[in-house]
Image: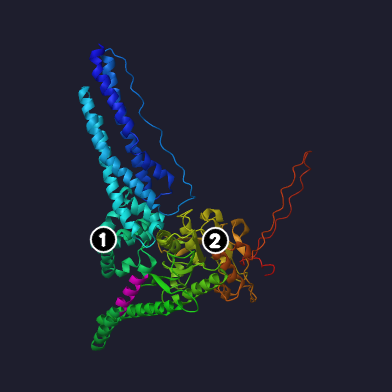
C-alpha cells in the first residue's frame, strides 16, 4: 500500500513546496497599499481586488494539496492537507495622513506585480503537472495562472499611469485625487458612466463633455472633480489643446481642470463671444433699420436686447479682472464664465491650486454678472487684508463665486421658486457650489496643509450652509457667515466643518430676518410664496448669530442708525477698510484665531441643586407675559473693540 501512495506523497510534497514559494506573491502589494494613505477613486477597489486575488491564490494551493491528501487517504495512506494560508500583511504608515505619491514605493509595487505575473503562470504549469500525476483536477493550477494574468494586467496599467504622473510639474506630490483616479483609475467604479463620457470627450465628442458639466452642476457625485482632474492630467498636451480649442467654455467650467488652464480657456471664450456678439449686433441693427414696425422687428429687438445685456456682462468681467495684478495683488484668474440670464462667473485673486489659504466668497440677493464688479472688489479687499496679516511667504487666494442664480428684488420676490424668502434658489445653487469646492480640493498641489474657507454673505450663506451639508467633513475647513439670515441648519455642528464663524452688525436688518419665526411654502396653483406663521427656527433654520446655534461670533463695528434701529447700508459694510469685521475675517482666513476679536458668550446659569427634603408647596402660576413686539430684534452690541 505504501508503494501505491508513494507517488502521491511525492506529488503532495511538490505542491507544498510550490505553495511555499508562491503563496506570498501578492503580499508585498498588499503591504504597500496598507502602508500608504492612498484612498479615493480606485485605490480602495484595487486594494480589495488584490486581497481577493491573494485569497484565491492561497486557496488554489490549499485545494490542490487537499485533493491529493484525500486520494492518499482513500488508498489507505495517512496524509493531512496542510494549511497554506498566511496572515494578511499589515503595515502602518509612519506618516500622518496623505503625504503625496511615494514614487519609490509605487515603483517597487509595480515591479512586484510584474514578478508575480511572470512567476505564477510558470508555477501554475508545475502545479498542473503535479496534479496530473496524482490524477486529480487541474482546476487549482488554472486559478494560479489566472492570478498571474491579473497581476500582469495591473502592472502594465499601473506602470503606464505612473510614468505619466511622474511627468507632472509637481512630480511625486501629486494629490490624492490624481492618485485615486489617475494611478488606480483602472479599478475605480463608474456607476453613472461619467468615466466613459470623459473618454468619449477626449476622443472628440463635445456632447459628452456637456453631459459631464451638467452632471457636475447637480453636485450629486462628490468624486467627479477628482475623476476629471486625473483624466485631464493623463491626457497628452495635444489632446488637451484640442479640447480647449473645440469647447473653451466647457473646459473653463470643468471642476477638476487646473485653475490656470480654466482661466486661459475662459478668456479665450470671452474673446470669441465678444467678437461674435459685436458681429451679430451689427447685422441685427441693420435689419431693424431696414424693416418697418411689426412683429418681425419686435423679435429682432428682443434678440438685440439680449445680446446687449451679454455685452454689458462681458464688460463687467473685463473691468473686474484688472483688479488683480495691482497694489501687490496676484493676477486675477477667470475660473468660470457663463453669459445670458443673470450670468455666472468665478474670479480668483491668486492661484487656488498653489495657495496656502483659499477663501471662496458666495454673494447674496441682487448679485448678477453685470454687477459683479462690487463683489470682485470685496474679494480683492479680502485678499488685501488676509495678505497683510498673514505670515511671510503665505500664499492667499480669494475667490468670488457667482455660480448660482441669486434672488433678485423684483417681481420674482413673490414667487416661491425665486423669492429671497425661500430656500429654493439656494438649494438649486448648493450643488454647483459643492462641486466647485470639490474642484478646488482636486486640483490643489500639495505643499503642506492648505486651509479652505467659504464665506457666505446674506442669501449666499444659505447656499453655503446647504452645500456644506452635502459634503460633511470634506467641503471646507471653516465657514464665515456675515449678514446671514440662516444656513438651513439647526446648529453649527450640523454643517460638518471644523469651525463656523459669524459676524453680524447690530444694525443689519437682513441678518435679523433669521430671528423671525416664519417660513414659506408654494401655492400649488399660482406658485406664489405663502408665508407660514409661526415657525420657531426662522425661515432658514436657526439664526447663526443666536448663541444656541453654537458658532464662534466675532465683533462687527456698530454704526449709527435711525429710529428703526437699522441701517440697510450695514448689510454690505462688512468689508469696510480698517473695520473690525474685515480685520477679523482676515485673521480667520489666516488661521490666527487668537487675534480675532470675539463676542463674549454669556454663561448659562447652573441648574438648581435638587432638594433633598420635601419640595415646597407650589405657588400660584404668575400672570402670562405679554408677547414681544413683532419688530425684529437686533444683535447684541459688542462690548468694546
- Residue sticking out furthest to the bottom: 289
Q: Quarter-wise, where is residue 338 in the image?
A: bottom left
Pick the residue in front: 635 or 183: 183
* Relative side of 25 to 92, left or right: left
Left or right relative to 40: residue 201: left
Identify the secondary structure beneath mark 1. helix
Residue 606 visible to an observer of this rendering: yes
- Does the magenta segment cover residue 267? yes
- Residue 125 vertical position relative to residue 352 in the rendered view, above or below: above
Q: Is residue 183 above or below residue 92?
A: below
- The dot on residue 202 is 1
Q: In this figure, what is the number of numbered marks? A: 2
**In the displayed image of the protein, which residue is found farthest to the top?**
1
Residue 281: x %, y % from top left:
28, 82
> Residue 592 is drawn in which quadrant?
bottom right
Residue to which mark 2 is pinned: 518
Callout 1: 10 Å neighbours few (<14), some, many (20+)? some
The residue range painted magenta reads: 263-274
Looking at the picture, how far across and down is residue 232, in whole percent?
Answer: 32, 61
Between disc 1 and disc 2, the foreground one is: 1
For the point 25% across and 20% down, which residue is it? 8
What secondary structure is the stretch in magenta mostly built from? helix
Amino acid at each position: 500500500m505504501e508503494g501505491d501512495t508513494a507517488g502521491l506523497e511525492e506529488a503532495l510534497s511538490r505542491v507544498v513546496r510550490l505553495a511555499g514559494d508562491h503563496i506570498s506573491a501578492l503580499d508585498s502589494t498588499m503591504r504597500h497599499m496598507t502602508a500608504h494613505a492612498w484612498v479615493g477613486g480606485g485605490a480602495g477597489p484595487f486594494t480589495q481586488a488584490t486581497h481577493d486575488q491573494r485569497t484565491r491564490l492561497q486557496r488554489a494551493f490549499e485545494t490542490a494539496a487537499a485533493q491529493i491528501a484525500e486520494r492518499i487517504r482513500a488508498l489507505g495512506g495517512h496524509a493531512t492537507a496542510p494549511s497554506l494560508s498566511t496572515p494578511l500583511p499589515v503595515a502602518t504608515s509612519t506618516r500622518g495622513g496623505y503625504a503625496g505619491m511615494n514614487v519609490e514605493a509605487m515603483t517597487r509595487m509595480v515591479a512586484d506585480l510584474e514578478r508575480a505575473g511572470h512567476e505564477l503562470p510558470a508555477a501554475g504549469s508545475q502545479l498542473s503537472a503535479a496534479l496530473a500525476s496524482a490524477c486529480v483536477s487541474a482546476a487549482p493550477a488554472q486559478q494560479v495562472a489566472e492570478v498571474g494574468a491579473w497581476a500582469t494586467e495591473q502592472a502594465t496599467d499601473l506602470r503606464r499611469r505612473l510614468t505619466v504622473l511622474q511627468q507632472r510639474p509637481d512630480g511625486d506630490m501629486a494629490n490624492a485625487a490624481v492618485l485615486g483616479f489617475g494611478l488606480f483609475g483602472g479599478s475605480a467604479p463608474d456607476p453613472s458612466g461619467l468615466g466613459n463620457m470623459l473618454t468619449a470627450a477626449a476622443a472628440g465628442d463635445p456632447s459628452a463633455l456637456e453631459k459631464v458639466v451638467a452632471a457636475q452642476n447637480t453636485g450629486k457625485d462628490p468624486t467627479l472633480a477628482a475623476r476629471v482632474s486625473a483624466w485631464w492630467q493623463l491626457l497628452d498636451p495635444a489632446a488637451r489643446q484640442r479640447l480647449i480649442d473645440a469647447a473653451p467654455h466647457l473646459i473653463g467650467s470643468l471642476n477638476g481642470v487646473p485653475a490656470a488652464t480654466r482661466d486661459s480657456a475662459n478668456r479665450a471664450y470671452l474673446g470669441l463671444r465678444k467678437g461674435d456678439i459685436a458681429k451679430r449686433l451689427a447685422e441685427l441693427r441693420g435689419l431693424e433699420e431696414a424693416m418697418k414696425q411689426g412683429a418681425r422687428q419686435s423679435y429682432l429687438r428682443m434678440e438685440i436686447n439680449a445680446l446687449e445685456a451679454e455685452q454689458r456682462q462681458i464688460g463687467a468681467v473685463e473691468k473686474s479682472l484688472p483688479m488683480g495684478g495691482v497694489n501687490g495683488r496676484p493676477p486675477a484668474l477667470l475660473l468660470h464664465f457663463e453669459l445670458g440670464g443673470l450670468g455666472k462667473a468665478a474670479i480668483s485673486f491668486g492661484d487656488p491650486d498653489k495657495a496656502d489659504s483659499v477663501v471662496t466668497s458666495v454673494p447674496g440677493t441682487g448679485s448678477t454678472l453685470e454687477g459683479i464688479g462690487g463683489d470682485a472688489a470685496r474679494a480683492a479687499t479680502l485678499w488685501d487684508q488676509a495678505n497683510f496679516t498673514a505670515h511671510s511667504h503665505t500664499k492667499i487666494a480669494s475667490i468670488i463665486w457667482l455660480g448660482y442664480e441669486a434672488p433678485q428684488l423684483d417681481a420674482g420676490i413673490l414667487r416661491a421658486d425665486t423669492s429671497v424668502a425661500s430656500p429654493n434658489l439656494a438649494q438649486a445653487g448648493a450643488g454647483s457650489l459643492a462641486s466647485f469646492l470639490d474642484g478646488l480640493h482636486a486640483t490643489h498641489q500639495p505643499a503642506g496643509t492648505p486651509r479652505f474657507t467659504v464665506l457666505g454673505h446674506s442669501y449666499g450663506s444659505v447656499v453655503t450652509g446647504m452645500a456644506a451639508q452635502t459634503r460633511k467633513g470634506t467641503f471646507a475647513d471653516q465657514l464665515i457667515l456675515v449678514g446671514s439670515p440662516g444656513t438651513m441648519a439647526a446648529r453649527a455642528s450640523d454643517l460638518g466643518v471644523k469651525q463656523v464663524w459669524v459676524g453680524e452688525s447690530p444694525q443689519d436688518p437682513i441678518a435679523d430676518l433669521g430671528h423671525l419665526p416664519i417660513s414659506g411654502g408654494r401655492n400649488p396653483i399660482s406658485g406664489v410664496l405663502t408665508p407660514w406663521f409661526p415657525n420657531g427656527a426662522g425661515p432658514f433654520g436657526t439664526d447663526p448669530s443666536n448663541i444656541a446655534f453654537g458658532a464662534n461670533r466675532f465683533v462687527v463695528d456698530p454704526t449709527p442708525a435711525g429710529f428703526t434701529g437699522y441701517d440697510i447700508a450695514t448689510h454690505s459694510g462688512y468689508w469696510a477698510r480698517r473695520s473690525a469685521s474685515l480685520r477679523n475675517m482676515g485673521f480667520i482666513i489666516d488661521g490666527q484665531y487668537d487675534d480675532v476679536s470675539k463676542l463674549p458668550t454669556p454663561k448659562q446659569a447652573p441648574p438648581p441643586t435638587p432638594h433633598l427634603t420635601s419640595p415646597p408647596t407650589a405657588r400660584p402660576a404668575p400672570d402670562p407675559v405679554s408677547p414681544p413686539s413683532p419688530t425684529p430684534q437686533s444683535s447684541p452690541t459688542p462690548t468694546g473693540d
